Image (spheres, rainbow, N blue to C red):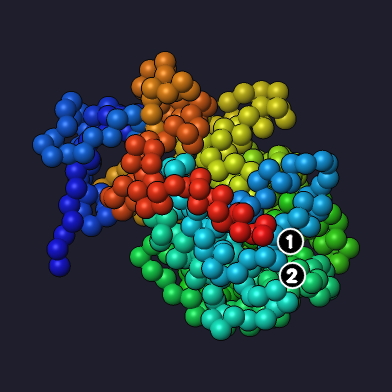
Amino acid sequence: MQVTTRTYWLEHAWLGTHVEPGVALSIEDGRITAVRTDTDSPPPGAEILRGLTLPGLANAHSHAFHRALRGTVQVGSGTFWTWREVMYATADKLTPDSYHALARAVYAEMALAGITSVGEFHYLHHAPGGTRYADPNAMGEALVAAAADAGIRITLLDTAYLSSGFGEAPDTHQLRFSDGTAEAWAERCSVLKERDHARIGAAVHSVRAVPAAQLATVARWAEERRAPLHVHLSEQTAENDACQAAHGCTPTRLLADHGVLGRRTTGVHNTHLTDEDIALLGGTGTGTCMCPTTERDLADGIGPAPALQAAGSPLCLGSDSHAVIDLFEEARAMELNERLRTRSRGHWTAAALLRAASADGHAALGWEEAGTIEAGALADLTTIALDSVRTAGPLPRLGAETAVFAATAADVRHTIVGGRHVVRDGAHTLVPDVPQALARAIEALRA
């Protein structure tokens, strides 16, 4: 077997706690084998990455098809629930082919933003009306193929979505989401196979979408495979109220009572929580995925991220509905939201926010070997410019602060996955014209 070797010289590298100038990386078969610091000049034959190189970013929560809603849902007023009706109308139009085209373009946009892994919270399983495709996993396979075509890693979080509310059957739009029972869901997604770039996880859409008696089936499926398990949790107060009415407890307590919480589980949003909820999540090591740009776009509210982290819940970040795709903005927004809420500054260091966007996000997606620049890690990297109109000026040693509080996705110059360029000098190497690909895929859904 031929071994592929590469050497990169990083002008500046964030090594988890600090920025180091002049770092040489040796890479074999997609993994970092050596990290050498204090290399004032590039080694012979090394490829040079000018700027600040970070570990590849992890987008821990994505609904790829929501990208088609950008702009269209900003007209007029409304709530999460009115936005949901527009979302359903878009979902109704997708086929495996059109979803592949859209997701390929969306994942390419992510690569341009420095994202090397995505957690796709996937519940759009069947044809409209609930009819199964010849391949019952055709829609999920389209997403896995789209990630490969865009050059990034994916954790397909195959999602159980069985009801429209507590004790209510799926509505017309939701029929294509549902397998009928958790057992049928498990049978279908057990056929999905992992690949070099793809891992398979599970998700409970929400406590309103999976009956309490079937939660344990989903949790057991994930536990048996030691797979990530994600769940939308307390995003809306209306869901909390309905859960109290149906079960006499909060959604967090319901999940705890049915074995859903734990160290491989991540609650997405975790917005409207009681003190007991926070203690349950932290005490079980259940993670929290904050999606600040979506949470503010949908007027969801600001979740208690500092309290959750203090209680023991690791934090990661996602772009969710893709109002924007920019993990620097997600990290920045988490801190700035807290500043607005508390009228005080400095809830997280820039290093802590970068860890949420990289190592902790990858861990939440089951890619524990990604998200750091160290020997043995996957060679997934993103390099941002330090000479753009946003990033010019600060000292390079303040690169972490510059990345979090000044940079945007537009400052990404290189994205490397498994040691190979997916984005070089700001251009995608596999999808030649990403804006055109997005426009074509979205226009096809309007036809």
- Indicate the secondary structure of the residue bearing disc 1: helix
Using residue 139 as the reference point, say whether residue 401 is left or right of it. left
- Residue receiving disc 1: 88
Of tags 2 and 1, the one toward the viewer is 1
Q: Are marks 2 and 1 in contact (CB under 8 Å)?
A: yes
Using residue 277 as the reference point, say whether residue 249 is left or right of it. right
Q: Where does residue 345 sit, x and y in percent of width and height?
A: 62, 23
Which residue appears at 81% of the width and 75% of the height? 169
Nearest the eye: 320 or 205: 320
Q: Earlier in the sequence, mark 2 or mark 1?
A: 1
Quadrant in the picture for the N terminus: bottom left
Residue type pointed to by label 1: Tyr
Q: Is residue 350 above or below residue 208?
A: above
Q: Where does residue 307 sit, x and y in percent of width and height?
A: 65, 40
CA distance separating discs 2 and 1:
8 Å
Residue 178 placement: quadrant:
bottom right
- Residue receiving disc 2: 174
Q: Residue furthest right?
A: 245
Q: Is residue 260 above or below residue 332?
A: below
Which residue appears at 73% of the width and 77% of the height? 129
Q: Residue furthest front?
A: 447
Nearest the eye: 219 or 421: 421
- Indicate the secondary structure of the residue bearing disc 2: helix
Quadrant in the picture for the C terminus: bottom right
